[in-house]
Image (cartoon, rainbow, N blue to C red):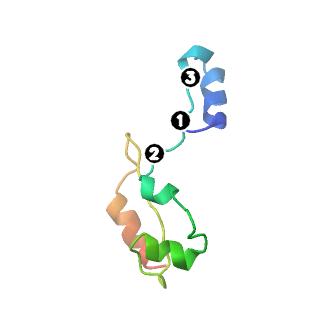
Amino acid sequence: MANDVVARQARDRGLRLEQITCHGLPIRPAFSRVGRQTDKYSMRLHLGLDAEASTVMLIGGGEGMGRIAAIAEAMSRR
């Protein structure tokens, strides 16, 4: 499960406690290694991103979230 909220929902739907483990959401390790780069500008440079551009991380799960390319395109127009 991604977090305790989802784990509670699973319990409410009949899963046993021993069937549930919270692991969080998987992300590339580079996104979780903040280190000394704590401000947005430095972190964007560290990750090889455009430091001046707005940044969005758009992800889909194993079940998919629909047309991810169309969602990204729509977001870029905003």
Q: Is residue 34 above or below residue 48?
A: above
Q: CA distance from mark 3 to mark 2?
A: 17 Å
For disc 1, the neighbor class at 10 Å (few under 14, some 14 to 19, many from 20) is few
Left or right? Give the position of 13 relative to 78: right
User: Can residue 49 be seen from the camera position used here?
Assistant: yes
Relative image position of residue 22 (x, y in whole percent) = 57, 32
Q: Are marks 1 and 3 in contact (CB under 8 Å)?
A: no
Would you place residue 4 above or below residue 72 in this image?
above
Query: Which of the two residues, 53 or 32, is positioned nearer the viewer here?
Result: 32
Q: Which mark is residue 26?
A: 2
Circle 1: residue type: His
**What's the distance in space between the residues labelled 2 and 1, CA to CA?**
8 Å
Q: Secondary structure at mark 3?
A: loop
Q: Secondary structure at mark 2?
A: loop
Q: CA distance from mark 1 to mark 3?
A: 10 Å
Numbered mark located on residue 20 in the image = 3
Location of mark 1 (residue): 23
How many labels were placed on the picture? 3
For the point 54% across and 41% down, the residue is 24
Identify the residue at image location x=62%, y=17%: 17
Where residue 42 appears, as percent x and y from the top left, is: 53, 77
The answer to the question of whether label 2 and label 1 lie on touching residues, with beta carbons closer than 8 A, is yes
- Give the x, y percent position of residue 56: 48, 68
- Dot 3: within a 10 Å radius of its alpha carbon, few (fewer than 14), some, or many (20 or more) residues? some
